[in-house]
Amino acid sequence: MAAKLYQLLTLLSLVIPLTQSEPSTSSPLFLSVTDFGAVGDGLHYDTAAIQSTIDACNHSPCHVTFPPGRYLTATIRLRSGVVLEIEKNATVLGGTKLDDYPPEMDRWYVILAENATDVGITGGGTVDGQGLSFVERFDERKNVMVSWNRTGACYGDECRPRLVGFIGCSNVWVSNVSLIEPAYWCLHIVGCENTSIQDVLIYGDFNTPNNDGIDLEDSNNTIITRCHIDTGDDAICPKTYNGPLHNLTATDCWIRTKSSAIKFGSASSFNFKGLVFDNITIVDSHRGLGFQIRDGGNVSDVTFSNINISTRYYDPSWWGRAEPIYMTSCPRDSTSREGSISDVLFINITANSENGVFLSGSKHGLLTNIRFINMNFTYNRWTNYSGGLVDYRPGCQGLVKHSTAGIIMENMKGFDVENVSMWWSDDHGRRQWNNPLDFRPSTVNGISLINFHSDSYQQQEKATQKLSFNSS
Ligand SMILES: *[C@@H]1O[C@H](CO)[C@@H](O)[C@H](O)[C@H]1NC(C)=O
Ligand SMILES: *[C@@H]1O[C@H](CO)[C@@H](O)[C@H](O)[C@H]1NC(C)=O
Ligand SMILES: *[C@@H]1O[C@H](CO)[C@@H](O)[C@H](O)[C@H]1NC(C)=O
Ligand SMILES: *[C@@H]1O[C@H](CO)[C@@H](O)[C@H](O)[C@H]1NC(C)=O
Ligand SMILES: *[C@@H]1O[C@H](CO)[C@@H](O)[C@H](O)[C@H]1NC(C)=O
Ligand SMILES: *[C@@H]1O[C@H](CO)[C@@H](O)[C@H](O)[C@H]1NC(C)=O
Ligand SMILES: *[C@@H]1O[C@H](CO)[C@@H](O)[C@H](O)[C@H]1NC(C)=O
Ligand SMILES: *[C@@H]1O[C@H](CO)[C@@H](O)[C@H](O)[C@H]1NC(C)=O
Ligand SMILES: *[C@@H]1O[C@H](CO)[C@@H](O)[C@H](O)[C@H]1NC(C)=O
Ligand SMILES: *[C@@H]1O[C@H](CO)[C@@H](O)[C@H](O)[C@H]1NC(C)=O
Ligand SMILES: *[C@@H]1O[C@H](CO)[C@@H](O)[C@H](O)[C@H]1NC(C)=O
Ligand SMILES: *[C@@H]1O[C@H](CO)[C@@H](O)[C@H](O)[C@H]1NC(C)=O
C-alpha cells in the first residue's frame, strides 16, 4: 500500500508541489487490542485495553489492530508511531457520557493524537460517534442537541465531543476508514504538518447542526483525496485561529451537505494560502464553494477546477442560500479587522442552482483578481423556500433583502469572466431573478467579460436574448 500511496503523491506533486513524506518503511509491529483484553461486544468499555495496547507500542510504526467487533470506548490517545488499524467489520464506538471525555472541553474526542508524529488510522473499519444519542429532539428543520455546558466552558448547543482529532501532529495518515455519526465535528486537524486523508467516508446525520466533515485549522501541507462526505454541516472547512494555513489540496471527492461543501472560515484570524480543489462533485448542498472571511486573515492563491455543483435552499436557520459560489469578506463585529481575498481561479465549473453567485468584499477587504473561466450556470427553482435575501452571516449585516441575480458583486477589484454561460429556467420563478449581473461601478472596478452569455433555458438553441460583450 505504501508504494501505491507514494505513486499517488508523486502524481499529485505534478499538480502542486507538495512535500509529503511516505510513512516509515521499516516493517511495523502488530499488536491486537483483543490480546490486551478488549471484548468488542459494544456493551463493556474497552478503553483500558485499547489504551494499554497503544502504550505497549515500543517500536515505530506500531499497528494497533481491531479485529471484527464493536469496541465501546472513552477517549483514547494515540502516540508517535502508532497507527490504529480498524479492520473491516470492526467499529470503534465513542462513549456518550460526559465522564467518557477528558475534563478540558477542547480535548473532547473519541480518538485524540496530540503532539505526535507518524500517526494514523486505517484498516477499512469504522469509527462511530453515536451522534444520534446526542439528539434531544429530532426535527427535520434542525435537530435539538444535548448540551454539556456543565462547566460553562463552551457555548450552549456546541458542547458536544468531536470524533477524531490530531492536534500539533506531523506526518498524519487517515486512510481507508469510515468516520460516522459524530456528535459534533468529525475529523479535526489542528496545527499539523504533512497530513494525508484518503479514501475516507464521512457520514453524519443531515439534520444535526455542527456535524462538520473535515475541519482543518492552522495546518500546512495537507492532502485530501477520494473522500465521500455526506453530512449536515460544512464538509471541508479550512479555518485559522492561531496561525496560518498553507498548502491544502483536495481532489476526487463527493460531497452532500446542508451547509457549505467547501468553506473558508468563518474563523479567519490568520492567512490562507495555496489551496487547490479539483475534481469534486457537490450535490444538493446549501452552498457550494464558500468563503466567510471575518477576522482579518487574508486569503490568496486558491484554485477550484473541474467541479460540478448543485445547490438548493434548505431551512434558513442553516447558513447558506443555495449559492453555488459565495465569497464574503466583512468584519465579524466592530472590533474585527477586514481580510482580503485575492488571486482565486475558478475553472471548468458547472452549477445547477436555485440562487446565483454572491461576491462581496468590504471596504478594506476587497476581493481582488478573481477569475471565472469555462463555467456553465443553470438557474432554476425546485424547492418552495423563498429567495430574495443575501446572506452576510455570521456577523456583518446578517440576512438582507436584495433581489436575486446571476452574479451579485460588491467591493471587488479585478474580475475576469471568460467563457461563462448562464441558462435561466423559463418557469414562474424566473421573474424574481432575471438579472444576470448586479453591481455598482462605485465599488466594483476592473471587470472584463469575454464570451459571456445569458440566455433562457428552453430557448438556448435559438440563442435569443444573447448577451455578449467586453468591458472594463
Ligand atoms: C507550500 O508549498 C510551496 C510550493 O511547494 C512551498 O514552497 C512552501 O514552502 C509550502 N509552504 C509551507 C508552509 O510548507
Ligand atoms: C513534512 O514532510 C517534508 C517532506 O517529506 C519533510 O521535509 C518535513 O520534515 C516534514 N515535516 C515534519 C514536521 O515532519
Ligand atoms: C463482515 O461482515 C459481513 C456480514 O456479516 C460478512 O459477510 C463478512 O465476511 C465480514 N468480513 C470480515 C472481513 O469479517
Ligand atoms: C503539546 O504541545 C503544546 C505546545 O508545546 C503543549 O502546550 C501541550 O501541553 C502539549 N500536549 C501534550 C499532551 O503533550
Ligand atoms: C481498505 O481495507 C480493506 C481491508 O480492511 C482492504 O480490503 C481494501 O483494499 C482497502 N482499500 C484501500 C483503498 O486501501
Ligand atoms: C453555560 O454554563 C454556564 C455555567 O453553568 C452558564 O452561566 C451559561 O449561561 C451557559 N451558557 C449557555 C449558552 O448555555
Ligand atoms: C505553516 O507555515 C507557516 C508559514 O511558513 C508557519 O508560519 C506556520 O508556523 C506553519 N504551521 C505549522 C503548524 O507548521
Ligand atoms: C474524479 O474523481 C472521481 C471520484 O470522485 C474518480 O472516480 C475519477 O476518476 C476522478 N477523475 C479524474 C479525471 O481524476
Ligand atoms: C461533471 O459533469 C460532466 C458532465 O456531466 C462530467 O463529464 C464530469 O465528469 C463531471 N465532473 C465531476 C467532477 O463531477
Ligand atoms: C492582511 O493583509 C493586510 C494588508 O496587506 C495586512 O495589513 C494584514 O496584516 C494581513 N493580515 C494578516 C493576518 O496577515
Ligand atoms: C478544463 O477543461 C478543459 C477541457 O475539458 C481541459 O483541457 C483543461 O485541462 C481543464 N483545465 C483544468 C485546469 O483542469
Ligand atoms: C450548460 O447548461 C445548459 C443548461 O443546463 C446545458 O443544456 C448545456 O449542455 C451545458 N453546457 C455545457 C458545455 O456543459
Image: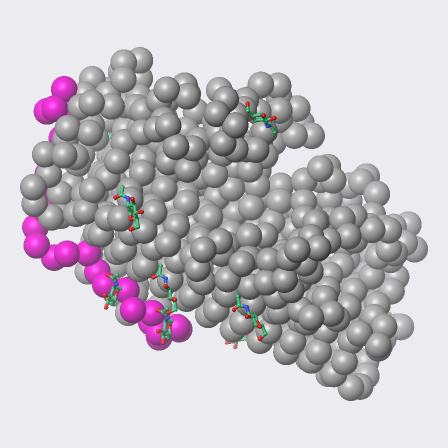
How many labels, in total? Answer: 0
Which image quadrant is residue 72 in?
Answer: top left
Residue at x 31%, y 60% (from the top left corner): 194
Q: Let me know if residue 81 is in the magenta part.
A: no
What is the residue that sits farthest to the top in this orientation? 43
Q: Is residue 338 above or below residue 428?
A: below
Q: In the rendering, at what x and y percent does residue 232 appear?
A: 57, 38
Residue at x 62%, y 44% (from the top left corner): 259
Q: Which residues are magenta?
A: 13-37
Q: Let me know if residue 14 is in the magenta part.
A: yes
Q: Is residue 371 above or below residue 324?
A: below
Q: Is residue 176 left or right of residue 466?
A: left
Q: Is residue 130 left or right of residue 13?
A: right
Q: Is residue 208 left or right of residue 312?
A: left
Q: In the rendering, at what x and y percent does residue 281 appear?
A: 54, 54
Residue situated in front as seen by the camera: 264 or 125: 264
Q: Does the image show residue 92? A: yes
Residue situated in front as seen by the camera: 39 or 460: 39
Residue at x 33%, y 46% (from the top left corner): 166
Q: In the rendering, at what x and y percent does residue 4 appear?
A: 23, 59
Which image quadrant is residue 341 in?
Answer: bottom right
Q: Does the image show residue 293? A: no
Residue at x 77%, y 68% (from the top left corner): 409
